[in-house]
Amino acid sequence: MKALDYCWRFAATALAFTVFGICGLGFSLILFPLASIWPHRESKQRAIAAIIHVFFRALVAVLVRAGVMKLDTRGAAALNRAAGQPVIVVANHPTWLDVMVLLSLTPRACCVVKSAHWSNPFFWGVVRAAEYVSNSDPVELVEAGARQLARGYTMIIFPEGTRSPTPNRLHAFSRGFAHMALQSGAPILPVLVDCDPPAFTKNMRWHDVPERAFHMRVNVLEPLGADELAPRDEPPALAARTVTSAIQAHITKHLIDYGFFKA
């Protein structure tokens, strides 16, 4: 039975990745051309954000129903406030799947994505049509993120820049989200992500399927204001450094407190 369960989850995982790749390519070939001729920019972005949200919500539901993964969330209603005050979601990045899960929980989302995805054949059209923000230019990242927040979109940022190096350690956070928060005044919403056993980490391929269904947990903490974390008289560069350090320490502490980081 154990071998049969593993084979089933391996096949389901392969099918999910195949569907994701085909849909990603299809979205790039269809959404981007349509977006380029859509006359109303705001309604275009809302529609594409909704399509991406529904797609990932369905994909997560299929993976859960198929027994590939388990998902528990705490405080996720804060991500579902479509008409609420826009926030900057700052999350740790243990697995590739946390992007999918957070987008499935956030209806009006805009992501900061690696510059490499802008030339990826499966993603290039999607990230452009959705007006996601590239991390290639730090100054433009902050400006573009502030514009998206002003339009009412929740910014999802993984400040490690890549997946965490080990299950119990974070990469140093980059400061883009802190500059964005200080410039826009939007609150920072720390989010903790855990995946046990590890799956789709930095050092794993898609076919490295765990021996049992992986359990993803998403805990949304209380929002924090950047102005509460840095002295008012600090220069912007120093204030951003202070906010970044405070948020990384805050997230690390709660990862330990919740048992997501194991001693």
Image (tube, rainbow, N blue to C red):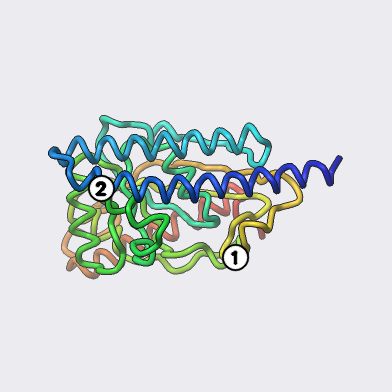
Q: Nearest the camera: 199 or 1?
A: 1
Identify the amino acid type marked 2: Pro
* Residue that label 2 marks: 33
Identify which residue is drawn at 52% across, 38% down: 59
Q: Residues within 10 Å of mark 2 (few under 14, many from 20)?
A: few
Q: Determine whether label 1 and label 2 are within 8 Å by CB.
A: no
Residue 52 versus residue 239 in the image, above or below: above
Instruction: Report the number of numbered marks.
Output: 2
Q: Position of residue 186 (x, y in %)?
A: 24, 46
* Residue that label 1 marks: 166
- State the quadrant of the C terminus: bottom right
Taking 262 as reference, is 160 left or right? left
Identify which residue is drawn at 39% across, 52% down: 90
Identify the amino acid type marked 1: Thr
Q: Position of residue 34 (x, y in %)?
A: 24, 43
Q: Nearest the camera: 252 or 192?
A: 192
Q: Secondary structure at mark 2?
A: helix
Q: Farthest residue toward the left?
A: 39
Q: Residues within 10 Å of mark 1 (few under 14, many from 20)?
A: some
Identify which residue is drawn at 33% across, 62% down: 118
Q: Position of residue 215 (x, y in %)?
A: 64, 43
Q: Nearer the viewer, mark 1 or mark 2?
A: 2
Q: Position of residue 210 (x, y in %)?
A: 71, 52
N-terminal-most mark, 1 or 2: 2
Q: Quadrant of residue 86?
A: top left
Taking 10 as reference, is 168 left or right? left
Q: Secondary structure at mark 1?
A: loop
- State the quadrant of the N terminus: top right
Identify which residue is drawn at 25% across, 50% down: 131
Image disc number at residue 253: none
